[in-house]
Image (tube, grey):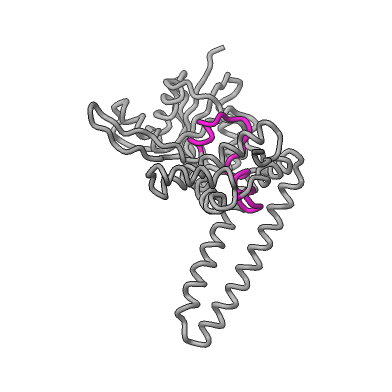
Amino acid sequence: MTEHTIGVDISKSHLDVFDAERREAKRFENSISGFRAFEKWLGKLEIIRVVYEPTGPYHLNFEERFCDKLPLVKVNPLQARRFAEACGTRAKTDALDARGLARMGVALELEPDIPVAKTTRILKDLQVARVALIKERTRLNNRAHVQTNAVLKRQTKARLALVEKQLCELDREIDALIQADRTTARRREIVQSIPGLGSVASAAILTYLPEIGTLDRRQVGSLAGVVPYNSDSGQWKGKSFISGGRKPLRDALYMPALVAMRYNPDLKAKYEALRAAGKPAKVAIVAIMRKLIETANALVKADRVWVPKTS
């Protein structure tokens, strides 16, 4: 049977799809009835990949509906756009985007993603809500320092109390979801055993890096966005820089790195060695972030907790 690659451009109201083999385009509603029509259109075709981009909240229902039914491939929108431009496509419409995604899947022979568990999707939603509450708490605290009006101060204090209550509720729900799954609970135990990674950071790592324990050190560093890339051309040697990766994961590693470089003996020695070698403080901190996530990945892969090195 002919293998088919499908490109899907997802917007708020509809799905634009393109079959690279049949060279056929179609539009469906971004709704339950539209999903049924899309499945009927696919029929019994041999689908090897369905390529789509994340589009804020609009792709979530599509992803949840087909994650266990179709070989989904989620690609970076910037990479998809650059691929289309490299193919000479300057115009941008939903139909052209769907065609470009299908062509990208065929040309690069993209492999389907590992289906994301429902628990992981719920954890991600909870983590996003938690980050929003942390920002709200910071904003309210900053406002409280400069307010003089009694009414405003009372209202700010009440909002802060509500935010703290909601944060505690979210943390309990996150803990309950992690503990309910034996594998996830074991992974958290391992990650949390590393000095510097507490319960909040370990939960964030498991949420934003569900592949932990299945990657090599280069892959895990790249996904966290803490691997430096060279910027050289001819005889010109530029500075290396970090780029890409999952920003929420990188954000979750920053504060633990500051703690680890003081209280984790191995990482404290690494930080001091980097600073002694003339590395800027931020470069050394990023190196600690990378070491933390690589160590966590290696320990989860080996299914063992962290133990200090013996002299």
Q: Is residue 172 magenta?
A: no
The x and y percentages for residue 30 are 53, 42
Q: Position of residue 143 (x, y in %)?
A: 47, 75
State which quadrant residue 25 falls in: top left
Q: Of 108 and 8, which appears nearest the observer?
A: 108
| Boundaries of the magenta span | 196-223
Q: Is residue 37 depicted above or below 166 in this figure?
A: above
Q: Residue at x 52, y 66 (%)?
A: 136
| Residue found at x 44% / y 26% | 102
**Which residue is rendered at x = 66% and y = 58% of the image?**
170
Q: Is residue 272 above or below residue 85?
A: below
Quadrant housing the C terminus: top right
Q: Residue lying furthest left in this view? A: 235
Image coords of residue 68 (percent x, y): 65, 32
Observer-nearest residue: 160 or 279?
A: 279
The kind of secondary structure the magenta stretch mainly shows is: helix
